[in-house]
Image: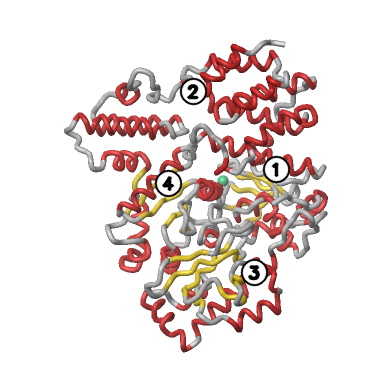
Amino acid sequence: MPNLIPRDFIDRLVSDSDIVSVLGAYLDLNKKGNNYVCKCPWHDEKTGSFTVSPQKSIYHCFGCGKGGNVLTFVQEMEGLSFVEAVEKLAEINGVTVPRESRSNIEDYSNIYQLNQVLAEYYLSALKDKKNKQVVDYLKDRGVTGETAKKFLIGYADFNQTEIKEKLIEQFGVETLLKSKNFLKNEKGIYPFFRNRLIFPIKNSPGKIIGFGGRSIDDSMPKYVNSSDSKFFNKQRELYGFNNAKQDHKKDYFIVTEGYMDVVMLSQHGIENSVASLGTAFSLNHLQKLFKLKKKVVFCFDSDEAGLKAAWKSLQLSLGQVFDDKTVRFLFLPEGEDPDSYVKENGQEAFIKKIERSMVLETFVYQFIKRGRNLDSPEDIRLIIHDFKQIIKLAKSETLKEMLLQKFEKELNIKKDLLLKQDGPKKKITKPSPKKDKFVTEFNNQYCLIIYLYENYYETIKESAETFENFLLKPIEEKDRLVFLPIDLELDKLAETIRALREGQKRKSKDYEILDTAIYAKAMMIDINLTNEEALNEFNRATDSIRLEFDKSFLEYLKELAEKRELSVERKENLQKLLNLSDNISVQEEELIKFLNTMVDF
Ligand SMILES: [Zn+2]
């Protein structure tokens, strides 16, 4: 969502906030001289190194180095976006957030309100005697009344005329239909959820954005969720996240497969679990969790489907696990899920399971070797083949090394064999130097691109537009050549450029930069370029990305050449890039031919 909150309002909000009272609501602050200290909420420590200075209105942790102002604190502590944090802080201070123009901004507050009213209605339906079978069902599953209230678990009856009329009166038909809780056909307006147990789904700030409905008889499908909309995106939201992020004591999140798992774990005092919304766990989900905690424990069924889901999550994780981030895997005994397990065995037993969960390296090994015979050279070869595929996805050098060591030890074969090139031409063994170089270089390259966008946009405009055509296409349409973790960096670049362009189009510096660290790094470049140099730099940096990822790049270059707009310099640079690549793809081969036949002008 673009940020149209005036900068001076944000500045005033920060300077008007009493940092001690805002942080004091989350932390146990003790006065020490001019400052306040306490134990850091983000790292484990025995004595307090977390220091708050009321004079300077900042906080800093001498243990882990985290620091900032009252706004960054609220943002980190609550896991909010920049705009959400401004809204939250305004709420704490009892002021309303002014908006410069509402034209671009869609306001969903009435939908959230409507959802809240509806959720409470569904909850109250449990009290109706005629719905006793639903209450019995919940009791049967072991859900207490208190838990039902906490998660607003309710029941959507067949007939919802009364609430429908009430919602129309209060919010209007348009909002009702926009909320997607009611649909319209030629016979009239009817409820989306009928005869289903209802689980309201909250976003990170705690607003109800959609619902999950579970059938309580044998009707299929077992689960139905609100359909995706601008305010409800299953790829980004997680069930239970709003509750889980508030558990600051645990340093990890648990990812489960179902709503009932989250609910039941909470009932047993384990508050840090989430579940995806009927879709596969996504990269967005993982990044959302890693923003708040360094560790994620995936808890899946131990059947074939559970294993496959875990393997998919592992593949996502390989590009995200670096520095002090980790993922683990917990497989409960066959036929059990967190819901049933915690009910039977209690909190302590479940936490013990979590503590003994599988580390990533072990899971990779276990998964790859399953169903294979370690005495068969043929199977060993297949294991090595799979290993080579998977190690390519790891981003961290340390992790790669650990994976290598694990396989070396378990299979009792030399590391060289695990890295050795297989087959005459393919080079998929040791992650090739070119790829590695690209990952590290890529950062600098996209920083440069961001820097040029911010400072030389008018100069690079024409090239930039065609680059955006490729970069900002929705992912599913993107004609990408490969899917590697590098894509994540590309997506970061896309996010940042999208935000920058939004701001530039409005001639405002008030936009939400999704990743301030990237932005800051880019601005550090701070070099003076002539317009010509800027354009050359931009083409050079974006060409190397498009060469690697953009299927339509060759077509684009041909067009440029026809219009006589492909400069000698650009051509030479492309040839240089192609010379560097030791693994020529079909696209690259064509490109070399094309460049060689091109007449210089
Ligand atoms: Zn700290």
Q: Earlier in the sequence, mark 3 or mark 1?
A: 3
The three-letter amino acid code for the residue at tag 4 is Ser
On the picture, is 264 further left or further right than 591?
Answer: left
The three-letter amino acid code for the residue at tag 3 is Leu
Residue at 53% x, 52% y is 235
Residue at numbered disc 4: 313
Above or below — where is 578 with respect to 401?
above
Above or below — where is 293 with respect to 195?
above
| Quarter the C terminus occupies | top right
Q: How crowded is mark 1: few (under 14 residues within 10 Å), some or many (20 or more)?
A: some
Check mark 3 vs ligand 1: CB closer than 8 Å? yes or no. Answer: no
Q: Residues within 10 Å of mark 3 (few under 14, many from 20)?
A: some
Q: Distance between the residues labelled 3 and 1?
A: 30 Å
Residue at numbered disc 1: 499
Q: Residues within 10 Å of mark 2 (few under 14, many from 20)?
A: few
Check mark 4 vs ligand 1: CB closer than 8 Å? yes or no. Answer: no
**Number of numbered discs present?**
4
Q: What element carries label 4?
A: helix
Q: How far apart are marks 4 and 2 (CA)?
A: 31 Å
**Mark 2 or 1, which is nearer the eye?**
2
Residue at 57% x, 17% y is 577
Labelled disc at residue 586? 2
Image position, residue 511 (x, y; %): 74, 46
Q: Distance between the residues labelled 2 and 3?
A: 50 Å
Q: Earlier in the sequence, mark 2 or mark 3?
A: 3
**Mark 2 or 3, which is nearer the eye?**
2
Q: Distance between the residues labelled 4 and 3?
A: 35 Å
Q: Earlier in the sequence, mark 2 or mark 1?
A: 1
**Mark 4 or 3, which is nearer the eye?**
3
The answer to whether the residues at label 3 and label 1 have Cβ atoms under 8 Å apart is: no
